[in-house]
Image: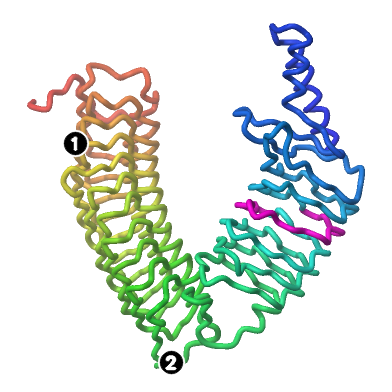
Amino acid sequence: MMRHGRVLYTLFLLIVAMNLSGCTEEATTADTFSRFRVADGITYELSESGIYYTAILWDGSSTAVAMADAFDDVNVTTIAEALFKNDADLVSVTLPAHLTTIMQEAFFGCSALTGLEFPDTLASIDYLAFAYCTSLTEILFPKVLSSIGNYAFAHCTGLEVADFSLGKAAVGASAFLDCTALATIEFSYNVRSIGQNAFKDTPWYDGLEDGFVYLYDYLFEYRGTIAPGQEIAIAENTSYIGYDAFRDQDNLTSIVIPDTVLRIYGYAFYDCDALVDVTLSAQMVELGLEAFKSCDSLTDIVLPTTLNKLGGGAFEDCVELTDVTLSPNIPVIDSQTFNNCPKLHSVFIPKRVAQIRESAFSGCADLETIVFEEDSLLLTIGSKAFRDCVSLTSVLLPARLTDIGAYAFSGCTGLAGVFLPTTLKTIGLQCFYRCVALTSIVIPASVMVIDADAFVDCDQLTIYCQAARKPATWDSLWNSEDRPVLWNHSVSS
């Protein structure tokens, strides 16, 4: 049904192109059909730029396919999503010589597919591209391949050998999940990233010995359980610490990350609830998603000045965290980075931070002070960013800020003063909900949108608006409880 629908859609495009063009019939027909080429049951479409073809349709007419390399010296570089999906009769495919991209689910469920040789040009294999290709037995990945998507080869139960030795492709999460015959994996010394559960439920993974598992300079994981009192030392030449590397290690109390380490990937120390002391690499550039989430005993952290990527939830639920020093080079404080860190008492936001995303500091009950570095580049504060920061008494928002999201300061019951800059354009839904200590606020003339109930339950509030009257773009319920409003307010007044 899916393939039939695509054929009809392609015919529709041809008819529309011929009927709507102002050219002669001969020119129109030639131009239209040069966009689509058909060879051996496969339809190829020329890109709008005219520099490559994509294989977009397959009629299922044979069990062995030799795909076209090019048409009129324009290379076939892409296999579209789901092109051969669930073709249980397809046995072999000769891929285009200049292929760069295999899109998601392109060969999903091709259970009879046995022979597969990737061209040297292949750069990416997308999500679920070869999942459930149960007859594949051996794969050699080319040198230029940069990414293998999530679940790309999941459930390939006949796969015995995966050879990455030529290159440094980033392997996605669960990429080889449940490859129950995969016992041999050859890695390159250029291993850079292996996603969460990439080789789960394979003989290779199940056969790993306890202790540190290194793939050259990549610390894949610590296997087994760290014993109480056991000292843990990461090898000095380590460059990467993998996903889940020390996850749930309840007896890990301290760790020194060598200065050779550039990246710590997601969940690396997730739920290490006895971890008290962490010294991070002075050269580190990335700290991944939820890397230290639920480290209940961690009290302080200093992020190196080289760090430019801080993953969402990196310190979420670190309930004893009191002090944090942010890197001056991070452009974003991501979603939930310090969510529910109730003892965090102050934070200094470096100049280069342009976004504070959803729930970044939500539930930081002891947070009293937020200081923005002079000449801050901050543009947006996301929804719930400082929700329920009940100890926050005042905040001076930086001069370039344009948007404050929904519920951003809701539940900040101690907030008595807030300064809004003259660049501000949007105040989100229930932005200051239950700010019961807030007695006054000045709304700059620059504000174009105030969403509903922005000041609901602010029982003591008087609103001073620089606009002469309510702008039409403000929600009709922006001041749903009819707090006192003074229009045409002057800053000097």
Residue that carries the numbered disc 2 in the rendered image: 228
The picture places residue 325, in percent across and down from the top left corner, at 24, 63
Seen at 38% across and 31% down, the residue is 451
Seen at 20% across and 32% down, the residue is 442
The picture places residue 473, in percent across and down from the top left corner, at 37, 21
Who is closer to the viewer here, 84 or 466?
84
Q: Dot 1 surroundings within 10 Å: few (below 14), some, or many (20 or more)?
A: some
Q: Is residue 485 left or right of residue 68?
A: left
Q: Outermost residue toward the front?
A: 73
Mark earlier in primary sequence (1, 2): 2
> Where is residue 231, by image quadrant?
bottom left
Q: Dot 2 surroundings within 10 Å: few (below 14), some, or many (20 or more)?
A: few
Q: Is residue 492 left or right of residue 421?
A: left
The picture places residue 90, in percent across and down from the top left corner, at 87, 52
**Residue type, mark 1 in image:** Ser
Q: Is residue 433 left or right of residue 393?
A: right
> Where is residue 6, by image quadrant?
top right
Quarter holding the C terminus is: top left
The residue stretch that appears in magenta = 108-127
Q: Outermost residue toward the left?
A: 492
312 relative to 376, above or below: below
**Residue type, mark 2 in image:** Pro
The picture places residue 460, in percent across and down from the top left corner, at 22, 39
Q: Principal SS element in the magenta part?
A: loop
Q: Decide: marks 1, 2 in contact (CB < 8 A)?
A: no
Q: Is residue 247 magenta?
A: no
Measure the alpha-carbon separation of dots 1 and 2.
Answer: 55 Å
Residue that carries the numbered disc 1 in the rendered image: 440
